[in-house]
Image: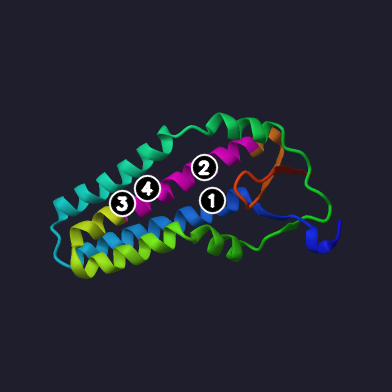
Amino acid sequence: MALDDAPVLVDARAQALLIGGARLVLGVGALVGARARGLDPGPAAGLFAFGCFVLLFALLAGSGRRHTDQRIAEAKNPPQEAVVEPLWRSLLKASYPSTIALTIGAGIALAANPSLAAVLAGILAGLGVAALIAASRVYLWERELHGRLLAERKRGGRIYLRTG
């Protein structure tokens, strides 16, 4: 395998922690912006919670958890030529398109409709919470498997376990 063909892997836990934190900060920032634009505290909190709840419900209602559990249980050591992507690049790639689009949408909504901005802020925060839940699950898997989980970025990509 040529070096150009070497798989580029992502540190699953670090990426989930980084993108989760970034989404929470952006969500809270958009909520603060909605309040600054005159949205009262009660409606702002309610709309934020609504956006967060709807997103988390949609994600948690989806099926895919068993499939992921099975893929992790079957994880093998990564190829020696595999390269782990730098964390800053992982964060940038994980932000596209959802986090960037929601942040831009919330920014536009701040000018036109602070209520909509509060809902979008909640959706962003919900994505952040979901990423932090994923990070905690990855941590538990890593403890059980005595290694570090690495994944190919592409959808359905292979999952590897680096031990030692």
Marks 1 and 2: CB-CB under 8 Å?
yes
Distance of label 3 from label 2 (alpha carbons): 18 Å
Q: Is residue 16 magenta?
A: no
Q: Indicate the position of residue 23 as horizontal and vertical percent values.
A: 42, 57
Distance of label 1 from label 2 (alpha carbons): 7 Å
Residue toward you, 111 or 141: 111
**SS label for mark 1:** helix
Sooner in the amino-acid sequence: mark 1 or mark 2: 1
Residue type, numbered disc 3: Gly
> For the residue carrying disc 3, how many other residues have a C-alpha within 10 Å: few (<14), some (14-19), or many (20+)?
many
Sooner in the amino-acid sequence: mark 3 or mark 1: 1
Is residue 117 placed above or below 50 in the rendered structure?
below
Residue at label 4?
Answer: 126
**SS label for mark 3:** helix
Is residue 161 placed above or below 24 in the rendered structure?
above
Is residue 105 placed above or below 55 in the rendered structure?
below
Distance of label 3 from label 1 (alpha carbons): 18 Å
**Residue 122's disc number:** 3
Distance of label 4 from label 2 (alpha carbons): 12 Å
Sooner in the amino-acid sequence: mark 4 or mark 1: 1
What range is drawn magenta here? Answer: 121-141
Marks 3 and 4: CB-CB under 8 Å?
yes
Distance of label 3 from label 4 (alpha carbons): 6 Å
